[in-house]
Image (cartoon, rainbow, N blue to C red):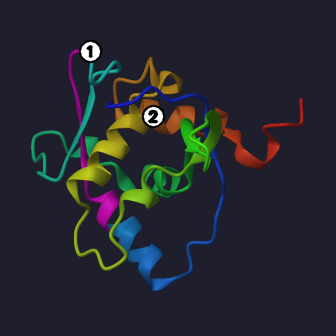
Amino acid sequence: MSECFGELYHLPCSYDGVWMKRLIRNMSELYCIFGESTQMTPNGIEVTRIRDIHNPENRIGSIIAYFIISSYITKHLVKFNADGGRFTYLSPVNIVLETIDPEFITVNQECLESIVTILNHPHFEECFSVKDIETQLPSVQNLNDRFND
């Protein structure tokens, strides 16, 4: 995880387009590796393109792939104005879709790193399997409901 991020949100979206369906199919073929916690992976979750024939249950699958492409994390952003002033603000960002090349054939390294960032968010702290992650997905707050408290 190269940056500190804030809250994790989910924004259900339409998955009808050819491009989106291809993206979900490609992401669903990725595999999670559950290991030791590190500074880069606080939950110990890595993601790889390499098929794990010994642990097929570690395949991300379509449920997590759908979630990943519709996930937003609040990120600290900085803007500079014309006179040199700067201000920092929080904004929800879809860090996965922002890293995908629109002409993609495979999931690129930057996208893999964004997926790792999401899966190592504190929301998934107690997850040690794909099933654990799937169990946590419904408790992620809808992005549109974040101000309804």
Amino acid residing under circle 2? Ile
Q: Is residue 66 above or below residue 104?
A: above
The residue located at (31%, 80%) in the rendering is 103
**Earlier residue among tags 1 and 2:** 1
Magenta residue check for 34: yes
Q: Nearer the viewer, mark 1 or mark 2?
A: 1
When asked about the image quadrant of residue 137, the answer is top right
Secondary structure state at the residue bearing disc 1: loop
Q: Quadrant of the C terminus?
A: top right
Residue type, mark 1 in image? Ser
Q: Dot 1: few (<14), some (14–19), or many (≥20) neighbours within 10 Å?
A: few
Q: Nearer the viewer, residue 93 or 26?
A: 93
Residue 124 screen position, x and y as percent: 47, 26
Local crowd size for mark 2, using a 10 Å CA cut-off: few (<14), some (14–19), many (≥20): some
Q: Please identify the residue farthest to the right as the structure is shown.
A: 149
Q: Which mark is residue 133?
A: 2
Name the residue: 35% across, 20% down. 43
- Contact, CB < 8 Å: mark 1 with mark 2? no
Residue 89 relative to residue 149: left or right? left
Where is residue 6? Give x, y as percent: 57, 28
- Residue under label 1: 37
Work out whether residue 40 or residue 126 is closer to the camera in this orientation and state it.
40
Assess whether residue 101 is covered by the magenta stretch.
no
Span highlighted in magenta in the image: 26-37
Q: Is residue 64 above or below residue 39?
A: below
**50 versus 13 height, above or below:** above
**Image spot of residue 37 (x, y percent):** 26, 15
